[in-house]
């Protein structure tokens, strides 16, 4: 059964969702989504207990070994959305990650200098990375990120990033040989990259996370952002 709430218009369905302080696995894979120590806090609208605060080394949301939409293979596609609180800090930290110990299948990272990075891996030596600088954002302000991965049509960058519904300029870096995203048997974490990396926890609020198994259109991205910010 598809479960929707106010942040998800009925015609836009996701397969994995964290929203309004609740978890939904709509993939049919039976993943158990578990909160490992993150505390409930107010969201960007000031509503109590509608977001998660990740502020310690061992805190994260464990989504299980969830498939990243239809992202795998040479015709892979997916869209990831995350509502997050920007916080300047003198260390690197993860918004989310899926790391096997040798290969980071996906790695959503915010560097200490305010550079936002997303990496997708085919192997330990073959991956694509995109970066954009968001250091001008106000400290502790809330924002909505959308990552669109399209391995069919976008042969150069393969990934687009939208911040608050606006397409950002990015730098793309190809390392080794990357032709497709390869699945690893490991868990997806929100707020960290894996359970062993204690210094990469995010240390701010996260109130929304979703994965779609397709490329969302510009109008759909705008619609989701506008619903989120109400």
Image: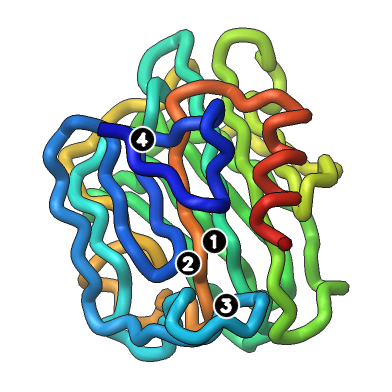
Between 208 and 102, which is closer to the camera in this rendering? 208
Q: Which residue is mark 3?
A: 43
Q: Which mark is residue 94?
A: 2
Asked whether the beta carbons under mark 2 and mark 4 sit within 8 Å of each other, the answer is no
Q: Is residue 50 left or right of residue 220?
A: left
The numbered mark, 4 or 3, whose residue comes first in the sequence reads 4
Q: Alpha carbon of mark 2 to alpha carbon of mark 3: how far?
A: 19 Å
Q: Please state which of the two labelled residues, at mark 3 or mark 1, is closer to the viewer.
A: 3
Disc 2 crowd, CA 10 A, few/some/many (<14, 14-19, 20+)? many
Question: Could you say which is closer to the camera, residue 43 or residue 83?
Answer: 43
Residue placed under numbered mark 4 in the picture? 15
Question: Contact, CB < 8 Å: mark 2 with mark 1?
Answer: yes
Q: Who's the residue at 19% across and 31% down the image?
A: 28
Cα separation, mark 2 vs mark 4, equals 22 Å
Q: Residue at left 33%, top 27%?
A: 182
| SS assignment at label 3 | loop
Secondary structure state at the residue bearing disc 2: strand
Closer to the eye: label 1 or 4? 4
> For the residues carrying marks 2 and 4, which lies nearer the camera in this image?
4
Please name the residue that numbered disc 1 is placed on: 109
Residue 194, by quadrant, is: bottom left
Q: Quadrant of residue 46?
A: bottom right
- On the image, the x and y values in percent for residue 84 come to 59, 68
What residue is shown at x 23% (from left), y 49% (from top)? 100
Q: Residue 4: x and y, percent?
A: 42, 44
């Amino acid at each position: 059964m598809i479960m929707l709430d106010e942040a998800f218009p009925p015609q836009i369905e996701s397969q994995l969702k964290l929203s309004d302080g609740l978890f939904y696995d709509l993939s049919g894979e039976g993943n158990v989504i578990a909160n490992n120590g993150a505390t409930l806090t107010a969201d960007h609208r000031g509503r109590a207990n509608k977001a998660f605060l990740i502020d310690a080394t061992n805190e994260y949301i464990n989504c299980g070994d969830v498939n990243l939409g239809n992202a795998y293979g040479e015709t892979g596609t997916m869209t990831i959305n995350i509502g997050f609180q920007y916080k300047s800090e003198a260390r690197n930290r993860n918004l989310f990650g899926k790391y096997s110990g040798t290969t980071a299948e996906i790695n959503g990272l915010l560097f200490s200098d305010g550079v936002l990075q997303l990496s997708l891996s085919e192997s330990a030596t073959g991956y694509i990375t995109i970066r954009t600088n968001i250091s001008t954002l106000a400290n502790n302000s809330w924002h909505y990120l959308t990552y669109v991965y399209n391995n069919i049509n976008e042969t150069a960058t393969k990934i687009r990033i939208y911040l608050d519904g606006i397409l950002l300029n990015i730098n793309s870096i190809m390392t080794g040989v990357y032709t497709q995203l390869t699945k690893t048997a490991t868990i997806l974490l929100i707020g960290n990259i894996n359970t062993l990396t204690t210094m990469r926890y995010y240390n701010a609020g996260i109130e929304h996370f979703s994965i779609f198994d397709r490329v969302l259109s510009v109008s759909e991205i705008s619609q989701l952002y506008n619903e989120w910010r109400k």
